[in-house]
Amino acid sequence: MIHVDGLTKYYHDLCAVDQISFAIQKGEILGLLGPNGAGKTTILRILAGFLQPTAGTIRVKDYSIDAHFLEIKKLLGYLPESAPLYHDMLVYDYLDYVANIREIDKRQKLPRIRRLADLCGINSVMHQPIGELSKGYKQRVGLAHAMMNDPEILVLDEPTSGLDPNQIVEIREIIKKIGQEKTVILSTHILSEAEATCDRIVIINRGKIVADDRTANLKQTLSDKSRIDLTLQNADFASLQQKLGTINGVDRLTPIEETDHHLRVSISCQGGVDPRAAIYRQIKSTDWILLEFHQETQTLENIFRELTKES
């Protein structure tokens, strides 16, 4: 449905987006992840038509963003990180105003507002001034605004930024419900949110895509970089390294903490081999006391850190 090819954006000499290419299928919820300054917001603003790319092309359905700018805008609903709301207006009056700007037919306007109020959970605040609402409710009103023209594609920039945990869960559920009918693209810093909400994740670092896949596949991709943490009593690092260093699958031992009372070690393991049983047997053959034996599982947070860490 959406095809991005060689997208590049320069701010003077700064390259914010560097030849990015990806495709988004109809009905997919795509999450853009990356550290601050990675280029996520720039990509969304270009897609929503607020910025012109320096190079590259974007096609939405059969439309090119260069030649069919207005046609693409009609297909999109966009919610920036700070929803552009008029705080002096009542929620209902504001949505009615947005519906008029969007040229919604008068016969369809009230049913449309009611449906959005139900979907976004704002029925209880429809006659309150927007300025008196919590941040969570303001985001919901902004979401209703973005969906007023019933867009096929919804673009959300940090939709849960600044919300408390309960509000995050509520917005997440709304997005998942919307994703059953529409294509959704969202950026976020909350990794658990992306993992729970998105069908697919694109991780961006310094303007480049460093990962693009479903969450389960991303975890599998880096599964060969496993680690075992050990804590032992009555052991020293030199003896432990001699004892475990020759085990098949053990790549490297790194001391974390060594005192008179205990030794903590991190063991990097090679892919395709599980050395835990051999490690345990070697330790069992000594008089060392095993206090901790833990294999670190691969999480989205670990993958994110690995792919976006400084060189």
Image: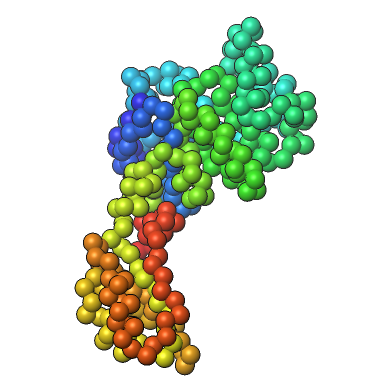
Position of the C terminus, as image quadrant, is bottom left
Q: Is residue 167 left or right of residue 17?
A: right
Residue drawn where x is 31% and y is 63% of the image: 225
Q: Residue at x 47, y 93 (%)?
A: 260
Identity of the residue drawn at 42% across and 81% down: 290
Residue 277 lies, in percent from the top left, at: 30, 72
Where is residue 269, by image quadrant? bottom left
Colour logic: rainbow
* Image position, residue 188 (x, y; %): 50, 45
Rendered image quadrant of residue 240: bottom left
Position of 236 with respect to 79 (left or right) is left
The answer to whether one can see residue 88 in this image is no
Instruction: Work out whether residue 55 or residue 240 is closer to the camera in this orientation and state it.
Output: 240
Question: In the current view of this chain or complex, which residue is farthest to the top?
Answer: 107
Q: Is residue 249 above or below residue 237?
A: above
- Asked if residue 103 lies left or right of residue 263, the reply is right
Question: Toward the viewer: 13 or 111?
Answer: 111
Residue at the (36%, 32%) spot, across then down: 24
Quick one: which residue is furthest to the bottom in this view? 260
For the N terminus, the quadrant is top left
Residue toward you, 84 or 285 = 285
Vertically, is 180 above or below 38?
A: above
Residue 274 appears in the picture as rendered: yes
- Pinpoint residue 283: horizontal percent, then vertical percent: 33, 83
Q: How many marks?
A: 0
The image shows residue 125 at horizontal and vertical percentages of 75, 30
Please say if 130 is above or below 211. Answer: above
* Image height of 263 relative to 87, above or below: below
